[in-house]
Every structure is written in structure tokens, then in C-alpha cells.
Image: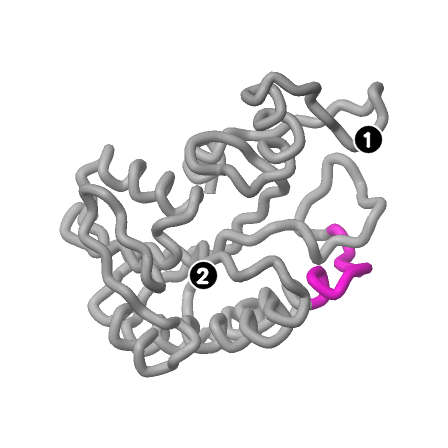
């Protein structure tokens, strides 16, 4: 296992950094892939995963690939780019015979959904972003069903922790506290919400 190569796509984000930290703690070999960002103390490979040739090149010789790439938070971008990115990564993993771990969210589930819920929960997205994420995940599920690649999808809602500065919890709650302002939370006071740390989340995945 320690001689195998783990490639982290989207390494500079909160989940990517947490994955790398976990890999380092186990002394696993890894490649950190970003689009253009540099990471202090970590050698990075810069790749545009929307380009099929670049995706194939960066994934070659990989044994495990972690897909945790973030795109601009815009519906049109998600609808246009996420499916292309997924198709390129699937093809690259197929060529490299690499196992894919896709770190997904829960946008594809329409509200309200069962609590707790599992893989059998109906996916009825009610937003453009949810539709885009469902289409993206469905591409991977189809490739798995056709035995093109081996893969797993891990899903999580919001989380907090190191580098997780784009989460709702951070932006409206923790950041306000740090600034000496009143924290804000959307929802009923009686509704219990549990959020994992990003480190706990990647270990569970």
C-alpha cells in the first residue's frame, strides 16, 4: 500500500489538504494536483482537468485518485464544467487502472429528505446546482456499472475545520464570532445540526 501512488485532485482546497494530511500521517506516496495554486511545503502539479490530455497525463501511474475539485459557485459553471471534468477523470482512471474516490455533496437530494438517510434516498434535485451534481455523479455511477473503473462516492453536507473558509458555518457563524459580531444561523432553534470537521470527514470517506 505504501508503494502505491495516491493522486489528490483539488489538493489546495480544505478537503484536499485534509486528505494529504491523512496520507502523510500514514507515510503514503501522493501527488498533489491543483489548477494553479502553490502549497507551502508540498510539491504541486498544475493541471487543467477540463483538458482530457492533461487529466490523463497527471493521473497516469496512479493507484488511487481523490476527486475533490471545487469550481466557482455558479450554476452555469457547474452545469457546463463538472460533467466534462468527471468524464475526463473517469477516462484517465480507466487508462491508468486507478481507483477513484469522489468526494461529493448532497445537492442532488431534494428537500425535505429523510433523516437519517442512505444510498436509497430518492434523488430529486430542486436547484440547478443540484441537477448539475446529479448529472456528474450519474456519469460515474454509469462507468462503475459498466465496469470501466472501480470507484466510490462519499457524500457530506457542510463541514468545518482547517482551511474550510467557504462553508456556511464559517461565513455566517464562526467568522462573525472572530470579528466580535453576533453569529448568524439559518433554521429553527430546535433543529439539531451536526457538522463534522473536515479531518473527520475525509477519514470516514
Task: Work out whether residue 192 or residue 61 is closer to the camera in this orientation and state it.
Answer: 192
Task: Work out whether residue 78 or residue 195 is closer to the camera in this orientation and state it.
Answer: 78
Q: Secondary structure at mark 1?
A: loop
Task: Inspect the magenta stretch and tell me whether residue 130 lies in it.
Answer: yes
Residue farthest to the bottom? 53
Residue 7 versus residue 80 in the image, above or below: above
Q: Give neighbour class at mark 1: few <14, some 14-19, many 20+ (Cα, 10 Å).
A: few
Q: Residue at x 80, y 41 (%)?
A: 114
Residue 67 versus residue 179 in the image, above or below: below
Indicate left or right for 123 with 195 as reference.
right
Looking at the image, what colour scheme do you see? one colour
Task: Inspect the magenta stretch and tell me whether residue 3 lies in it.
Answer: no
The x, y position of residue 30, in whole percent, is: 22, 52
Q: Which residues are magenta?
A: 121-131
Q: Residue at x 75, y 23 (%)?
A: 192
Q: Give neighbour class at mark 2: few <14, some 14-19, many 20+ (Cα, 10 Å).
A: many
Task: Work out whether residue 29 or residue 149 is closer to the camera in this orientation and state it.
Answer: 29
Q: Secondary structure at mark 2?
A: strand
Q: How many marks?
A: 2
The secondary structure making up most of the magenta span is loop
Question: Disc 2 designates what residue?
Answer: 151
The x, y position of residue 139, in whole percent, is: 57, 73
Q: Which mark is residue 187?
A: 1
Question: For residue 172, which quarter of the picture?
Answer: top right
Mark 1 or mark 2, which is nearer the start of the sequence? Answer: 2
Q: Which mark is residue 96?
A: none
Amino acid at each position: 500500500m505504501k508503494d502505491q501512488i495516491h493522486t489528490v485532485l483539488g489538493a489546495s482546497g480544505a478537503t484536499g489538504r485534509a486528505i494529504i494530511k491523512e496520507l502523510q500521517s500514514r507515510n503514503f506516496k501522493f501527488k498533489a494536483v491543483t489548477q494553479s495554486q502553490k502549497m507551502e511545503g508540498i510539491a504541486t502539479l498544475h493541471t487543467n482537468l477540463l483538458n482530457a490530455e492533461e487529466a490523463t497525463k497527471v493521473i497516469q501511474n496512479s493507484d488511487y485518485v481523490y476527486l475533490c475539485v471545487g469550481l466557482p459557485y455558479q450554476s452555469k459553471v457547474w452545469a457546463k464544467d463538472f460533467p466534462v471534468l468527471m468524464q475526463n477523470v473517469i477516462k484517465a482512471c480507466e487508462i491508468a487502472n486507478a481507483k477513484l474516490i469522489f468526494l461529493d455533496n448532497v445537492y442532488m437530494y431534494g428537500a425535505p429528505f429523510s433523516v437519517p438517510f442512505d444510498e436509497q434516498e430518492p434523488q430529486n434535485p430542486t436547484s440547478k446546482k443540484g441537477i448539475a451534481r446529479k448529472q456528474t455523479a450519474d456519469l460515474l455511477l454509469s462507468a462503475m456499472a459498466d465496469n470501466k473503473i472501480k470507484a466510490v462516492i462519499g457524500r457530506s453536507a457542510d463541514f468545518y475545520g482547517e482551511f474550510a473558509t467557504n462553508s456556511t458555518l464559517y461565513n455566517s457563524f464562526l467568522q462573525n464570532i472572530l470579528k466580535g459580531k453576533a453569529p448568524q444561523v439559518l433554521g429553527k432553534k430546535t433543529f439539531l445540526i451536526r457538522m463534522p470537521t473536515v479531518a473527520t470527514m475525509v477519514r470516514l470517506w
